[in-house]
Amino acid sequence: MTKAVHILAIESSCDDTSAAVLEDNKVLSNLIATQSVHEEFGGVVPELASREHQKNIVPVVDQALAKAGIDKKELNAIAYTNGPGLLGSLLVGTSFAKAFSLALDIPLIEVHHMQAHILAHFIQNSSDDGSPKFPLLCLTVSGGHTQIVRVDSSKEFKIIGETRDDAAGEAFDKVAKILGLPYPGGPQIDKLAAKGDPMKYSFPEASIEGFDMSFSGLKTAVLYFVRDEMEKDSTFIEKEIENICASVQHVIVQTLIGKLERAAIQEGITELALAGGVSANSALRKSFEELCVEHSWNAHIPDFEYCTDNAAMIGIAGYFKFLNSEFGSLDNAPKARLSL
């Protein structure tokens, strides 16, 4: 019987400090320390994020090992996010991972954050009916990225469409700020939109050839629309916020699903997946599932706990690299920008 592989994974690309322990492709623990310090600023403050990571990383790793029932001497490798992300935040996770790897004399595995979001579908204890088969077409949607990615293996990724400006998650957050909603705004819009009429207001959808997208124009359109309506009625947002949220969400979801559908048809791929923090959006999940039912495609959506930034997704990506003996070096530095 082959001996199980135990990997400690660390994720610190933005404002969540997370540590997970995996036994092969099964998650034994997956802990996340969120940072509430950014709420009063309406967005993540990089310097504050890195300081919070420094406070959280040791106790989070300690708790992850304890919950998994794994002694550090049983670990076979340390996987960590080396980009893309906030450089100060990445440095905290990178420094800890390197020190731990050196102290235990075990391999270090560098993981691309966006690849990890996609590979989260291969975690064994997901509620999905089964892991996707290659080739796979994945719509990856987060606060910093919006991409349609063709995946031919655990290490072959090709972007065939992406946003040219704001990511979809960024658009949600910016619209939420215009409407006076608390940070993070995306979940707030999702909640309010459930009670609104998605066809009440018509907001523009960017017309771009191919599979690229744009969301900056939507944000500007909402800003001017709200400004003009508030001049007529100062209580407009209060009265219509549910309908505004529903209408904005409709345009974003329609854009994403429309591009994904055309890409899947052109690529001839029937295995479709949704990944990234915005994949937790209820309207997006519903539209994605309806699209796949309509075309008889296989739909794959990760459990909620693996949608947002978490270390378990870093661990599964690290596991694939471990099997291929793709190890990192103590000399390598994290990168804020990193191509897929």
Image: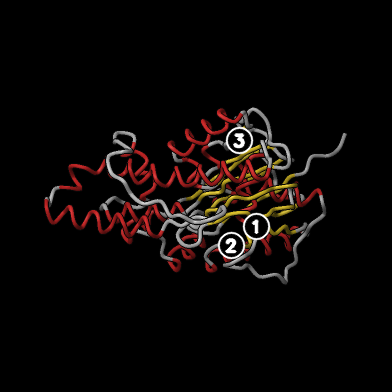
Earlier in the chain: of badge 1 and badge 2, it is 2
Q: Position of residue 53 (x, y in %)?
A: 51, 60
Query: Disc 3, disc 2: CB below 8 Å?
Result: no
Given residues 38 and 267, the one toward you in this image is 267
Residue at (45% x, 51% y) in the render: 34
Residue at (83% x, 39% y) in the render: 3
Q: What secondary structure is marked by label 2?
A: loop
Earlier in the chain: of badge 3 and badge 1, it is 1
Looking at the image, residue 61 sits to the left or right of residue 327; the answer is left
Residue 67 in the image: above or below residue 166:
above
Q: Mark 3: give few (<14), some (14-19) or many (20+) Cα within 10 Å.
A: many
Q: Is residue 209 visible?
A: yes
Which mark is on residue 112? 1
Q: Mark 2: give few (<14), some (14-19) or many (20+) Cα within 10 Å.
A: many
Q: Which residue is mark 3?
A: 300
Residue at (66% x, 70% y) in the render: 333
Which mark is on residue 240? none
Given residues 187 and 70, the one toward you in this image is 187
Q: Is residue 64 visible?
A: no
Residue 127 in the image: above or below residue 192:
above
Residue 338 in the image: above or below residue 180:
below
Q: Position of residue 80 (x, y in %)?
A: 65, 57
Q: Quadrant of residue 170?
A: bottom left
State which quarter of the image contains the C terminus: bottom right
Amino acid residing under circle 3 = His
Q: In the orientation shown, which residue stands out farthest toward the right?
A: 1
Residue at (38% x, 59% y) in the render: 217
Query: Disc 1, disc 2: CB below 8 Å?
Result: yes
Q: Position of residue 315 (x, y in %)?
A: 67, 48
Amino acid residing under circle 1 = His
Tell me the distance, in whole angstroms, between the alpha carbons under discs 3 and 2. 24 Å
Q: Which residue is mark 2?
A: 84
